Every structure is written in structure tokens, then in C-alpha cells.
Amino acid sequence: MSILLAVVAFFMAFGALWFTSEIARRLDLKNQSALEPHIGPMQESLRRAERQIRELTLGLEAAEQKIHSMDTKSRSLREGSLNGRDEEPCSPNNVSALDIIRGTGRFYPSETLKN
């Protein structure tokens, strides 16, 4: 008799587990459908922000390229003017404009603007 009660209890436990998991799954589906209208505007604003970040990144890269080209042009002009005056070339601690913008080098006006 105890074996029969154990088997019945075992099936009742599995039935309760299946019933509970089925209720949880259905509630989850209802919650997903209730949240979808609210998630749409947030996803759109997230896409818009990502698009703006991409555009800003492209603009920053273009600005870095322009600064780098201007820096190399400035160095070539400065070296050309120094060669004609028999002065020492600029110190090896030159700080480029790109380094100043990135914050990798400190800005010392006395070192960068030698007359």
C-alpha cells in the first residue's frame, strides 16, 4: 500500500511541476506582448543615438586626419626655415597637435613655439 501511495505522490509532484512551468511560460508570453509597445520607442531612440555616435566618430577621424596633415605640413615648413638659418632643429620632445587633442602629451607653449 505504501508503494502505491509513493507512486501516486510521485506523479502528483511531476504534475504540479508541469502545471507550474506551463503557467510561468504563459505569463512570460503575455508579459512580452505587453512590453513590446513600450520597447519600440526605446529601441528607435537607441538606434538614433548609435547612428549619431557613428557620424561623430567619422567626423572625429576626419578631423584627426586634417590635424595630422597640418601638423606634418607645419613641421616641414619649420624644418625648411631652420635649415636656412643654421639653427638647431626643434627638440626631440616635440608635441604634435594630435597629441595635445588626444591628451597624450602635455602642452608647453615655450617648447612648441620657438622663434
Image (tube, rainbow, N blue to C red):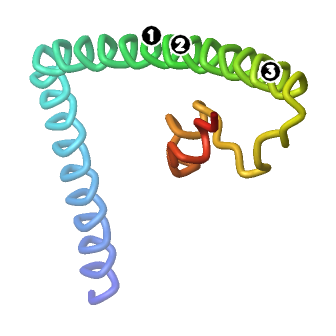
Depth-wise, is mark 3 or mark 1 nearer the camera?
Answer: 3
Quadrant location of the N terminus in the rendered image: bottom left
Label 3 – label 2 distance at C-alpha: 35 Å
- Amino acid type at circle 1 is Glu
Going by the picture, which residue comes out furthest to the bottom?
2
Query: In the rendering, which numbered label is found on residue 58?
Result: 2
**Residue pointed to by mark 1:** 55
- Amino acid type at circle 3 is Ser
Q: Based on the displayed image, in which of its 4 quarters is residue 26 positioned?
A: top left
**Local crowd size for mark 2, using a 10 Å CA cut-off: few (<14), some (14–19), many (≥20):** few
Mark closest to the chain's N terminus, 3 or 1: 1
Q: Which residue lies at the image location 24% right of the left edge and 80% below the top edge?
A: 5
Label 1 – label 2 distance at C-alpha: 5 Å
Depth-wise, is mark 3 or mark 2 nearer the camera?
Answer: 3
15, 53: nearer the viewer: 53
- Do the numbered discs 1 and 2 sit on residues whose CB atoms are within 8 Å? yes
Residue 31 image point, x, y percent: 13, 31
**Residue pointed to by mark 3:** 81
Q: Give the left or right position of residue 3, taking residue 87 as reference.
A: left
Mark closest to the chain's N terminus, 3 or 2: 2
Q: Give the left or right position of residue 2, taking residue 50 as reference.
A: left
